[in-house]
Amino acid sequence: MRTGSLVKSIGQDPWRYAPWILAAGVFVPLATIFSSFLVPERHIWEHLASTLLPHLLLNTVILVGGVAMFTILVGVSLGWCTGACDFPGRRIFSWALALPLALPAYVMAFIFLGIMDFAGPVQTFLRTLPGLGSLIIEVRKAPFIILVLGLTLYPYVYLLSRASFLNQGRSVFEASRTLGLNTRQAFFRVALPIARPWIVSGLALVLMETLADFGAVSIFNFDTFTTAIYKSWYGFFSLEAAAQLSSLLVLFALSLVYVEGLYRSRMRCYDSSRGSAQSVRIRLKGWKAVCATIYCSTIIMIAFVVPVLQLVFWSIQTITSGQAVDYSHHIVNTLVLGAAAAFLVCIAAILLTYARRRDRGGLTGLLCRIATMGYALPGTVLAVGIVLPVAWSDTVLQRWFTAISGIQTGPLLQDTILIVLGAYLVRFLAVGFGPVDSAMQNIKPSLDEAAASLGKSGAAILRTVHLPLLRKGVLTALVLTLVDVIKEMPITLMTRPFGWDTLAVKIFELTSEGEWIRASVPGLYLAVAGTIPVVLLIRQMEKE
């Protein structure tokens, strides 16, 4: 009975198909990955379990734990300095400290190795000092990969913790003073506990990115689940083993999704007026002001200024030495894939937000949540989860076509751009959904009612009323999705058709051979592209 009524309700409003279809885009890869245990690759799995799996688990725990501690320490301290204190340069640091988001982690990784490796300028200089002629610092170790990932990911914690400290307002700070607390006590006993939902939410995003990272850990030769999935596919040539490893990584990712959603719901409970936030800033004086300025300056120099200057220097060196390669083909491929994926994501985001607007029921909300869950899934996991069902579908289609026509055909779906775009759609739908959904929330329901009273249908209302008002949100979604797709490495690397190498893939190839300097030119292109969403974010911060 319930099934019949559900089908009937969907048939009455065809817009309800959108959440079901888009949610299936996440459900099918997940179902494929977990169903791989039905046909386990025993010999490969036994080899992995006895030799590699303990090592992977240990590396993952060390990496996740180290990045978590680093980003909490740096992100929260910077958020407190710029959100609750006043010192020379605070206004500039407030937005400049978000700039490291523009650098992909794998770009920061090869810059770090190019500077700090045995043949790099730092160790070369140190060996010229008396008594250090035989100095060798092994930089391909966990502390250094933690440092690289931490420097690129701390802005997630910084931005959210800063927003919390700004949101707390005068009343919270004055209440701590009436209890006889000094500034340090007010931070640890009042401000920090209130900011905990924001901090944990930002930390969950950091850990999702850490688990999903493939490029940086590959450059450091630091084995994690993402690199093991890639090696299982291209080393053991076993998609099933890769899927079984992916299932373990998915469990971690889904746990983080749950934690992030739980604490995000708690953030609303602590929302307070920001009208007097500026008047309660703690004015730092003397050595405290100097330390705050030096601390913020050091972080921004190490995390953004020095890496970008090094990219520029290497790029000039590459071009003047005649080693520069024509990257026009890679740029065109990158932009074509990015633009096509951004267009698909925006169309899907519009359909999803409009379907949820028309039906506020719990089922539609759940489907929307599932459909936008793909951002938490690592690119290597999605690649495996999509290629397996596509390969099965391709086999069925080939048999069907041969049975009808008697003609043997090659792969119809595999090794096509459709797989890449499908994986991008699942992975980045959440990126496009956020801005479009926010813009949709600002449209008053009375406009829908007025249009309906004039005889407009659902499609006509969307076209004539909503789309013009969604223009700004859609444009933001286009830009953010385009830049994220441009920087995406594992999905492109593992699903691209022959000849569709992008800038990210080229960086992977060059860094695999230790060509740090030659990788600087495509790295600089990506760094410039990565500044676009950060600039948009900074403009939004300044408006607030």
Image (cartoon, rainbow, N blue to C red):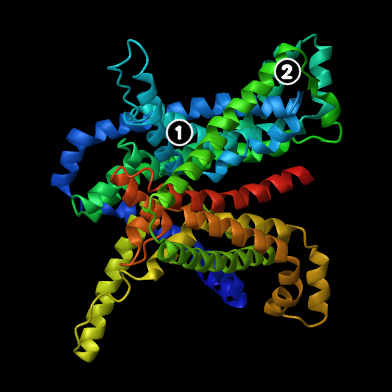
Observer-nearest of 515 and 369? 515
Q: Is residue 202 left or right of residue 52?
A: right
| Above or below for 529 versus 359 | above
Observer-nearest of 220 and 257? 220
Query: Which residue is drawn at the image coordinates 49% and 62% (left, top)?
Result: 425
Dot 1 falls on a residue whose secondary structure is: helix
The earlier-in-sequence mark between 2 and 1 is 1
Marks 2 & 1, CB-CB < 8 Å contact? no
Quarter of the image where one finds residue 59: top left
Q: Which residue is the extreme one toward the bottom?
A: 405
Viewport quadrant of the C terminus: top right
The amino acid pointed to by label 1 is Val
- Residue 479's spot in the image, x, y percent? 60, 59
- Residue 382's spot in the image, x, y percent? 39, 55
Observer-nearest of 196 and 89? 89
Q: Is residue 452 left or right of residue 22?
A: right
| Above or below for 184 versus 137 | above
Query: Which residue is drawn at the image coordinates 31% and 69% (left, top)?
Result: 415
Q: Is residue 256 left or right of residue 444?
A: left
| Residue at the spot of label 1 | 148
- Residue 34's spot in the image, x, y percent? 32, 51
Distance, label 2 to label 1, CA atoms, is 27 Å
Query: Which residue is drawn at the image coordinates 34% and 27% (left, top)?
Result: 141
| Residue at the spot of label 2 | 289
